[in-house]
């Protein structure tokens, strides 16, 4: 049975992703999931078993599926609907985080380009 650390769980309520805090948000989410011992699905791929899978293999698959689902619920709770978009359909927590990271990497590059463009067009006014 999974025990949930109350302080880690209450901290997760304060970690809400906005347009400017992706790196901090990701670090906090990984710490929270690690403290709660739910991060297995982030570090190993989903186990595959055959029809003749052993009881241990089936147990490992069930554990991975449960932890993956719990991670997704915790992560989605801290992401506003506007950022989720089509990513909501992803069912693997590792892929979900990668998709969000891609989205914010694109936004970060666009923001950097905008800032550089405005800096090159600014004229010194003597102040």
Image: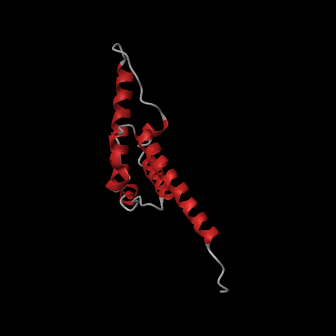
From the viewer's perspective, is residue 44 above or below residue 97?
Answer: above
Colour mapping: secondary structure
Question: Which quadrant does the N terminus fall into?
Answer: top left
Classify 119 as above or below 34.
Answer: below
Residue ranking furthest to the top: 52
The quadrant where residue 70 appears: top left
Location of residue 3 with respect to 114 vertically, above or below = above
User: Does 90 sit left or right of 26 as displayed?
Assistant: left
Q: Position of residue 107 (x, y in %)?
A: 49, 55
Which residue occupies 44% across, 44% down?
99
How many circles with numbers are drawn on the protein? 0
The residue lying at 39 percent from left, 58 percent from top is 7
Q: With 122 as the anchor, is 82 left or right in this view?
A: left
Give the residue drawn at x 47%, y 43%. 98
Q: What residue is drawn where x is 42% and y is 30%?
A: 46
What percent of the width, then of the height, locates residue 104? 48, 53
Query: Is 70 in front, or is 120?
Result: 120
In this view of the protein, which residue sits in the foreground, 105 or 36?
Answer: 105
Looking at the rendering, which quadrant does residue 67 occupy? top left
* Looking at the image, residue 113 lies above or below residue 97: below
Q: Return the x and y of residue 47 as percentages of the image width and height.
A: 42, 26
Q: Quadrant of the C terminus?
A: bottom right
Residue 111 placement (x, y as % from top left): 53, 60
State the residue in front, 39 or 88.
Answer: 88
């Amino acid at each position: 049975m999974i025990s949930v650390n109350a302080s880690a769980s209450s901290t997760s309520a304060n970690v809400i992703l906005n347009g400017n805090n992706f790196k901090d948000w990701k670090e906090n989410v990984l710490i929270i999931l690690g403290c709660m011992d739910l991060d297995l699905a982030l570090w190993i791929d989903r186990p595959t078993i055959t029809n003749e899978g052993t009881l241990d293999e089936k147990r490992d698959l069930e554990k991975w599926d449960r932890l993956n689902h719990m991670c997704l619920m915790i992560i989605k709770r801290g992401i506003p609907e506007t950022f989720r978009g089509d990513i909501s359909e992803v069912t693997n927590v590792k892929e979900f985080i990668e998709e969000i990271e891609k989205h914010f990497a694109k936004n970060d590059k666009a923001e950097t380009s905008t800032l550089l463009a405005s800096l090159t067009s600014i004229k010194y006014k003597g102040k």
